[in-house]
């Protein structure tokens, strides 16, 4: 069989490594053959291709030195940065019921690269968060995950990099429309060399007399990655004009030829990119507007997912849930929506409904530690006790180092539920042995120690928990309660203030503060 | 008329255990998105590859050293 044909076949079947090997052999025989060269480029790109729609990691430098957000002191509800969980007027389960992530956001059903960090409110918090090993945030864009992957892929090739960026004749390839796009994607995704990619895009768009919307979008993406958001926005807006022209032609041809719905062919990329820029500029409401106008043109497009992410980021869970359900109307197998709906049901006291959604995910073929852990919890709270321990066993057998602590922690809750305090104690201990920074376990251990009457140990646990996770109001409250009980009113007052800072609506904290204040007044 | 209180001397004593402290809630684990899974997989394989390469390099170095040592021994014997 013709090796090039075989390579193309492998490429189509997404067996990229085999395709790359064949192309390498072909190129060794004839280094100037452009067909295997571009095929190899495309295979290498596809191999490391990432769906940017899931968001990119926000790096520490961006968070600390962010001068792009327009309003530094934004009005409530208009900024992702200042969005506080459960401020008045918002609905959804309170923080006492639904746990928060490290950045103080309510726990979501799905974790994405963009959602791992979140946006901490202050510099202090931003610096604190990466201390725990599990959510280490890269310090600057230059040390982000993508770049690390890029250098690693270069290391692994024996004969050095496939294309030497420094010696690449950009203007020559920019004029060749057949190769230029593949080369751009290779540089952008595989090499992560944004400056070279930008150079290529700029020359290529010149070569096609600024008529191709694709190149403008790529320019915008490069600007976006380089942090030049205003330039990116300009490029997108120009490209939208070209794009709709192209899009209308497609619609007409599709209706004439009566082929597949066009949304399978073109997607609303410019709209989506524009929304992302708005999010980066911390203008979530503007992003929502962009997405909504995009949805009018492209109903049922993937940008609908970005809408619920923004609502979630603004802590507007009720609206977010409505949109998850809308997504399922268009795409009944969307894992993210199903998981988010399930999480929402669980924390609004409907574990049996959550169980149905998680079971659906299991049927769809998701088979990992997380899903079994969630199934087990849902079973337990929906009073289907026979399944609970089996699911936990399965979760433990599938768990790797990252998630085993959470499984033990949840198992501890089940033990508490059936009144086996010793088992609960052991479970929380095991959670700590696999993840030494598991603040929730420290807090619960503290509570158990308090029950046993070991007040000093309990106090130490609470203090550890609150230093590890300043987003947990429970450990602050417990510490304050304990200090109040042992007569250390000053400490109690200081700590309860912190608790109320995290969760202003917490009733018990308010009561404690009130009683402390009346004490001090009496003095 | 005044009723006298009655306190039974025998019988079970019930006490409702009211937990004043706040436990952290059970935590549903968020599923990983496809992109995140792919990222982590790629990172893992990249780390493994670099480790393998380092091992190979070390082996080569060790072999080189061993051969030079042997050579020097031969020199000494001569």
Image (cartoon, grey):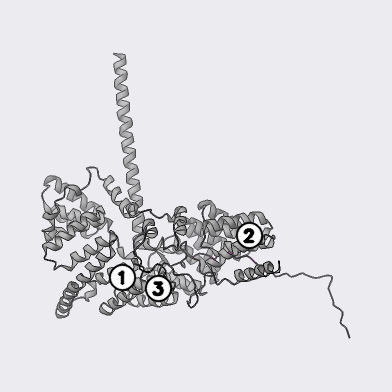
- Categorize mark 1 by other alpha carbons within 10 Å: few (<14), some (14-19), many (20+): many
Label of residue A78 in the image: 3
Residue A233 shows in this picture: yes
Q: CA distance from mark 2 to mark 3?
A: 36 Å
Give the mark nearest the N terminus, 1 or 2.
1
The residue identified by callout 2 is A491
Query: Which quadrant of the figure has residue B49?
Result: top left
| Towards the viewer: A482 or A255 | A482
Query: Which quadrant of the figure has residue A170?
Result: bottom left
Which quarter shows the C terminus of chain A? bottom right
The image position of residue A448, as x and y in percent, is 63, 59
The residue identified by callout 1 is A275
Give the mark nearest the N terminus, 3 or 1.
3
Q: Is residue B24 magenta?
A: yes
Give the mark nearest the N terminus, 2 or 3.
3
Q: CA distance from mark 1 to mark 2?
A: 46 Å
Residue A400 shows in this picture: no
Same chain check for tags 2 and 3? yes
The image position of residue A55, as x and y in percent, is 34, 63
Q: Is mark 3 in CB contact (under 8 Å) with mark 1?
A: no
For the residue labelled by badge 2, is the local secondary structure a helix, a strand or a loop? helix
Boundaries of the magenta span: B11-27
The mark closer to the camera, 3 or 1, is: 3
Same chain check for tags 3 and 1? yes
Say above or below: A265 vs A58. Answer: below
């Amino acid at each position: 069989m013709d090796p090039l044909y075989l390579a193309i076949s492998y490429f189509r079947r997404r067996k990229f490594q085999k395709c790359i090997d064949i192309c390498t052999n072909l190129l060794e025989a004839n280094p100037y053959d452009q067909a295997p060269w571009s095929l190899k480029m495309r295979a290498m790109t596809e191999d490391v291709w990432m769906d940017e729609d899931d968001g990119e990691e926000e790096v520490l430098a961006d968070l600390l030195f962010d001068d792009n957000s327009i309003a530094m002191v934004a009005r409530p509800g208009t900024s992702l940065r200042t969005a506080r969980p459960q401020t008045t007027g918002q609905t959804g389960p309170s923080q006492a019921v639904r746990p928060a992530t490290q950045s103080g956001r309510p726990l979501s059903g799905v974790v994405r690269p963009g959602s791992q960090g979140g946006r901490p409110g202050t510099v202090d918090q931003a610096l604190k968060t990466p201390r725990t090993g599990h959510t280490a945030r890269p310090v600057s864009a230059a040390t982000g995950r993508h770049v690390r992957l890029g250098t690693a892929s270069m290391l692994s090739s024996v004969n050095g990099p496939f294309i030497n960026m420094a010696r690449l004749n950009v203007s020559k390839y920019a004029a060749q429309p057949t190769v230029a796009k593949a080369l751009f994607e290779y540089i952008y995704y595989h090499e992560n060399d944004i400056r070279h990619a930008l150079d290529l895009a700029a020359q290529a768009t010149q070569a096609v007399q600024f008529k191709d919307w694709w190149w403008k979008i790529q320019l915008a993406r490069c600007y976006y990655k380089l942090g030049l958001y205003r330039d990116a926005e300009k490029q997108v807006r120009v490209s939208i004009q070209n794009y709709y022209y192209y899009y209308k032609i497609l619609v007409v041809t599709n209706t004439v030829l009566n082929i597949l719905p066009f949304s399978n062919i073109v997607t609303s990329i410019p709209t989506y990119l524009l929304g992302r820029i708005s999010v980066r500029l911390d203008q979530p409401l503007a992003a929502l507007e962009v997405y909504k106008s995009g949805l009018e043109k492209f109903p049922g497009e993937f940008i609908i997912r970005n809408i619920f992410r923004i609502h979630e980021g603004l802590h507007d869970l009720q609206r977010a849930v409505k949109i998850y359900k809308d997504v399922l109307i268009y795409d009944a197998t969307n894992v993210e929506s199903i998981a988010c709906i399930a999480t929402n049901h669980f924390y609004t006291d409907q574990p049996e409904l959550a169980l149905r959604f998680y079971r659906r995910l299991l049927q769809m073929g998701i088979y990992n530690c997380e899903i079994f852990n969630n199934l087990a919890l849902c079973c337990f709270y929906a009073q289907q006790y026979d399944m609970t321990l089996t699911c936990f066993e399965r979760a433990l057998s599938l768990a790797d180092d990252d998630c085993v602590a959470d499984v033990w922690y949840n198992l501890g809750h089940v033990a508490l539920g059936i009144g086996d305090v010793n088992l609960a104690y052991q479970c929380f201990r095991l959670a700590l042995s696999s993840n030494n920074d598991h603040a929730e376990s420290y807090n619960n251990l503290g509570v158990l120690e308090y029950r046993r009457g070991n007040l000093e140990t309990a106090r130490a646990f609470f203090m550890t928990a609150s230093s590890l996770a300043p987003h947990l109001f429970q450990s602050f409250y417990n510490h304050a309660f304990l200090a109040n009980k042992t007569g250390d009113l000053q400490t109690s007052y200081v700590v309860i203030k912190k608790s109320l800072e995290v969760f202003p609506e917490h009733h018990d904290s308010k009561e404690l503060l009130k009683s402390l204040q009346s004490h001090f007044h009496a003095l | 008329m005044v009723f006298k209180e009655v306190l039974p001397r025998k019988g079970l004593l019930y006490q409702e255990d009211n937990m004043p402290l706040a436990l952290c809630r059970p935590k549903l684990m968020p599923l990983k998105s496809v992109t995140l899974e792919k990222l982590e997989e790629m990172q893992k394989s990249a780390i493994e590859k670099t480790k393998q390469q380092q091992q190979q390099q070390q082996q080569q170095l060790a072999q080189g050293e061993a051969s030079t040592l042997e050579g020097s021994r031969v020199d000494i014997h001569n």
